């Protein structure tokens, strides 16, 4: 019984981070129909930023969280203006824009990964922060995991409420539904793009900080997280923000249970297998449209 | 007029002859650099058979290289080398044919990330197999053929892939593929069997990386899943293709030569700089040179004889003529 509870709890905690990662990825896909394959590298940069601030300046990750969020958001806005704005203006068709932006994101991920290797080396890193073990209804769990789970859930819900309840959120939802129509209705679509980039990049950076509190990380951690984010986004439905939230927790549970039942060596194999099956058979997601 | 008709065949014959003589006269280092260039030309050209003609950008092309390398490593010294090379190619065609049937229904960005996912899936499955079932990390290949021998094999495969791409480009089949790139639905409405055409192109494009993987495994003499299924191989194929210009058959030749020379000068001492440079080059091409270097070459005024070599081989204008 305890073992089951432990696996489920681990799955939920993982799911919280997955949801956060996927939400950010889905925001850019939903509003602009672009797939950010550099999403994992943003997470990696967030993790390294938290690591350096903690080991050099003794800054608590809870504080560096804010700095990383602001820094990542600014980076997102910078990237948007330098690369995507000119591309948007020049591209004649959506297909061309999608292909070009995919290449740009690929380039960014290669550049970021190699900058990290060049400056910080290729080895695995970690630090200890709030690693006290707490017993939650008899199940042992470290405090940093619980804390990161709580922050992740709060941020996910905050983002969900922002999108569902505010005027900006309404505009974002409208752009997700039909961009061309939004332009005609007087919505500043470009502004929505910028907001999506900022929120998406910030969430990836924050996810990196949260992961760094209890996971080892390296410059090569990006791709697996990008793939996980893709799985969650596709499961929940591309452009379906609420769906990503739920799908994040589902994937966290499934991979936690799946790994517990088979062997840790199969973790990557299982997650890629889920990915392939989902793209092939459920490319529209498992929840349908009205979520 | 008369002179011009001879320029192209003569130039091509001269290039061929010098390529044939490389191992005899050049140093080992030069030979291995040219061998690398030929390898990339073969990889990129075969990638273009699907991606360049139909617009289906695959990030899993490197997986075929890995499958070829692993196949040859498993049967080395059991079967003769030429048969191994051929079988490696055929096995990749078979894999592509099986995988391609469901995968090619997926379109656009989904297809791109799906191919990446598939190649990573193969990689991690092999890692699991090597570590947990065979109890090894990789394979060491002993008594491999000489550099000269491998050079000629890669040269043959590379020329075959260029010839294949060229013939497809000039055929009805090529037109069908290019119509898929322009508008798949319209092509189908006009009677093109898009599913079949894509399927064939995918299978053909898998033949060459399989054979190249078989030869290159002999060159590397040690292989493990992480190196032969490195997604960077597939990324580099894509970047090389875009650098050269994906609408041109001679694009890969320009792109592969540039990038291999760049990698020779940077890779050994600053591998990360090389990768960063690749990323920057890719951004630069997308932003400023969407037609690639071959596109640039066709626009600027180059001396007549150089232009004649490349002219009409493969320019997009040619498509309108056909």
Image (cartoon, coloured by chain):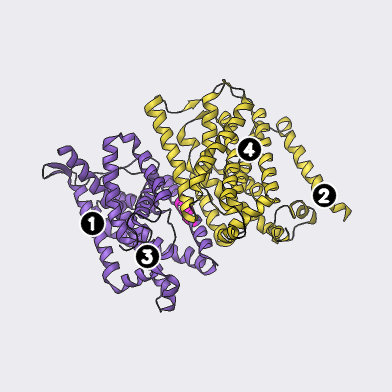
Chain colours: A purple, B yellow
Q: Percent x, y for residue B247?
A: 64, 55
3D distance between C-alphas at marks 4 and 1: 53 Å
State the SS at label 1: helix
Q: Is residue B210 visible?
A: yes
State the SS at label 4: helix
Dot placed on the residue nearer the N-terminal end, 1 or 3 = 1
Quadrant in which residue A24 is drawn: bottom left
Query: Same subunit under labels 4 and 3?
Result: no
| Residue indicated by mark 4 | B33
Q: Is residue B45 left or right of residue A51?
A: right
State the SS at label 2: helix
Per the picture, the main secondary structure of the magenta-coloured stretch is helix
The chain holding disc 2 is B
In the foreground, B185 or B139? B185
- Local packing at callout 2 (Cα closer than 10 Å; few below 14, some 14-19, many 20+) is some
Circles 4, 1 touching at the beta carbon (< 8 Å):
no
Q: Nearer the viewer, mark 4 or mark 1?
A: 1
Query: Same subunit under labels 1 and 2?
Result: no
Circles 4, 3 touching at the beta carbon (< 8 Å):
no
3D distance between C-alphas at marks 1 and 3: 19 Å
Q: Nearer the viewer, mark 4 or mark 2?
A: 2
| Residue indicated by mark 1 | A153
Magenta stretch?
A104-111
In the foreground, B121 or B180? B180
Query: Same subunit under labels 4 and 1?
Result: no
Circles 4, 2 touching at the beta carbon (< 8 Å):
no
| Residue indicated by mark 3 | A196
3D distance between C-alphas at marks 1 and 2: 69 Å
Q: Nearer the viewer, mark 1 or mark 2?
A: 1
């Amino acid at each position: 019984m305890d073992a089951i509870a432990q696996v489920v709890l681990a799955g939920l905690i993982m799911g919280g981070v997955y949801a956060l990662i996927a939400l950010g990825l889905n925001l850019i896909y939903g509003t602009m129909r672009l797939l950010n394959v550099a999403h994992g590298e943003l997470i990696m940069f967030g993790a390294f930023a938290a690591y350096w601030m903690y080991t050099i300046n003794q800054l608590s990750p809870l504080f560096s969280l804010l700095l990383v969020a602001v820094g990542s958001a600014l980076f997102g806005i910078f990237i948007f203006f330098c690369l995507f704005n000119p591309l948007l203006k020049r591209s004649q068709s959506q297909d061309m824009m999608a292909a070009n932006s995919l290449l740009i994101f690929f380039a960014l991920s290669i550049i970021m990964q190699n900058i990290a290797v060049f400056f910080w080396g290729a080895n695995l890193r970690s630090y200890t922060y709030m690693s006290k073990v707490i017993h939650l209804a008899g199940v042992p769990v470290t405090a940093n995991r619980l804390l990161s789970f709580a922050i992740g859930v709060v941020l996910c819900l905050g983002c969900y409420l922002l999108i569902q309840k505010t005027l900006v959120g309404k505009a974002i939802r409208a752009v997700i539904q039909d961009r061309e129509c939004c332009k005609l209705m007087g919505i500043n679509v470009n502004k929505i793009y910028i907001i999506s980039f900022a929120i998406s990049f910030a969430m990836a950076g924050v996810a990196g900080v949260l992961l760094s509190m209890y996971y080892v990380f390296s410059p090569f951690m990006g791709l697996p997280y990008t793939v996980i984010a893709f799985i969650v986004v596709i499961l929940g439905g591309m452009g379906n923000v609420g769906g990503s939230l739920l799908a994040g927790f589902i994937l966290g549970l499934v991979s936690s249970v799946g790994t517990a039942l088979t062997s840790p060596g199969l973790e990557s194999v299982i997650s890629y297998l889920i990915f392939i099956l989902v793209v092939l058979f459920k490319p529209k997601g498992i929840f349908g449209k009205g979520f | 007029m008369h002179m011009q008709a001879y320029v192209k065949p003569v130039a091509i014959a001269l290039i061929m002859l010098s390529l044939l003589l490389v191992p005899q006269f050049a140093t080992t280092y030069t030979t291995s650099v040219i061998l690398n260039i030929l390898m990339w030309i073969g990889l990129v050209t075969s990638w273009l058979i699907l991606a360049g003609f139909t617009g289906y950008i695959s990030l899993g092309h490197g997986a075929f290289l890995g499958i070829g390398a692993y196949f040859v490593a498993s049967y080395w010294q059991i079967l003769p080398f030429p048969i191994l090379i051929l079988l490696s190619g055929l096995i990749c065609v078979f894999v592509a044919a099986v995988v391609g049937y469901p995968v090619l229904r997926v379109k656009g960005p989904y297809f791109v990330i799906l191919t990446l996912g598939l190649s990573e899936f193969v990689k991690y499955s092999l890692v699991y197999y090597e570590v947990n079932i065979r109890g090894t990390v990789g394979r060491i290949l002993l008594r491999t053929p000489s550099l000269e021998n491998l050079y000629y094999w890669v040269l043959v495969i590379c020329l075959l892939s260029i010839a294949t791409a060229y013939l497809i480009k000039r055929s009805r089949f090529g037109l069908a593929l290019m119509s898929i790139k322009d508008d798949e639905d319209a092509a189908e409405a006009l009677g093109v069997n898009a599913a079949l055409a894509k399927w064939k192109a995918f299978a053909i494009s898998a033949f060459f990386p399989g054979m190249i993987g078989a030869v290159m495994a002999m060159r590397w003499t040690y292989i493990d899943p992480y190196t032969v299924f490195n997604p960077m191989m597939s990324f580099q194929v894509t970047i090389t293709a875009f650098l050269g210009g994906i609408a041109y058959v001679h694009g890969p030749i320009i792109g592969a030569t540039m990038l291999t020379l760049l990698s020779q000068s940077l890779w050994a001492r600053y591998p990360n700089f090389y990768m960063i440079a690749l990323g920057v080059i890719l951004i630069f091409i997308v932003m400023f040179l969407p037609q690639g270097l071959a596109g640039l070459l066709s626009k600027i005024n180059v001396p007549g004889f150089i232009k004649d070599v490349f002219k009409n081989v493969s320019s997009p204008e040619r498509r309108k003529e056909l």
